Image (spheres, helix red, strand yellow):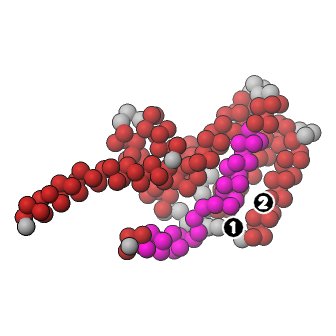
């Protein structure tokens, strides 16, 4: 009996990191690989991703009402229409609209790096779009982005905008109930 307990304990400690790694890979998708490549070690990257999950769980993220979603869709259509006559201004408006949407959903908006960190938990699959749009926006501010670059930025902003608008966690108590169900199974 003691041998079985020892074997189970050893299996637990051997399999636990692999299970944690799989969980993080599934949750973060391409962001997992990016974090690992940007980090000194896989362990440090996984620790950072776990910390992101923890910080993310402290936010009171909320879904948008159907009326708010419709309002944001109308605003996005206006921004896209503005692109034809004023691409530079439309890009700035697209960035602002994405930030407003993040704020209304309950995400912090105090800085680009912080935004990336918290968005990576639920929106990792569209996060690279945000990075590319942001990069083009910064190049546009110093006059180094072509109209084609700005068009590409609009496409990238739209991907994140759509993801934020249509996907994500419900209220915190719903997320906590879903988490509890997973652990009860």
113, 76: nearer the viewer: 76
Position of residue 113 measured from the top left corner of the image (x, y, whole percent): 56, 43
| Residue receiving disc 1 | 64
Report the span colored magenta: 153-181
174, 110: nearer the viewer: 174
Residue that appears at 62% across and 67% down: 62
| Residue receiving disc 2 | 72
Position of residue 95 measured from the top left corner of the image (x, y, whole percent): 73, 46
Residue that appears at 44% across and 57% down: 54
Residue that appears at 60% across and 61% down: 168
- Work out which residue is located at the far right of the displayed protein and give it: 85
The quadrant of the image that shows the C terminus is bottom left
Hey, which quadrant is residue 105 in on the image?
A: bottom right
Label of residue 141 in the image: none
In the displayed structure image, the side of residue 35 where residue 76 appears, left or right: right
In the displayed structure image, the side of residue 66 where residue 115 appears, left or right: left
Please rate how many residues cluster around mark 2, counting C-alpha atoms within 10 Å: few if below 14, some from 14 to 19, many from 20.
many
């Amino acid at each position: 009996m003691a041998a079985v307990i020892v074997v189970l304990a050893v299996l637990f400690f051997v399999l636990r990191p692999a299970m944690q790694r799989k969980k993080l890979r599934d949750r973060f998708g391409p962001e997992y690989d990016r974090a690992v490549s940007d980090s000194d070690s896989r362990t440090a990257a996984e620790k950072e991703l776990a910390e992101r999950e923890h910080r993310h769980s402290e936010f009171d993220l909320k879904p948008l009402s159907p009326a708010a979603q419709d309002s944001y869709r109308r605003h996005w259509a206006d921004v896209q229409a503005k692109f034809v006559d004023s691409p530079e201004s439309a890009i700035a408006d697209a960035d602002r609209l994405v930030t407003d949407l993040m704020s209304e959903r309950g995400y912090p908006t105090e800085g680009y790096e912080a935004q990336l960190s918290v968005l990576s938990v639920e929106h990792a699959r569209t996060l690279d779009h945000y990075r590319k749009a942001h990069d083009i926006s910064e190049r546009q501010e110093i006059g180094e982005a072509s109209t084609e670059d700005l068009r590409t930025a609009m496409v990238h902003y739209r991907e994140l905008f759509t993801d934020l608008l249509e996907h994500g966690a419900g209220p915190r108590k719903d997320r906590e109930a879903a988490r509890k169900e997973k652990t009860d199974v």
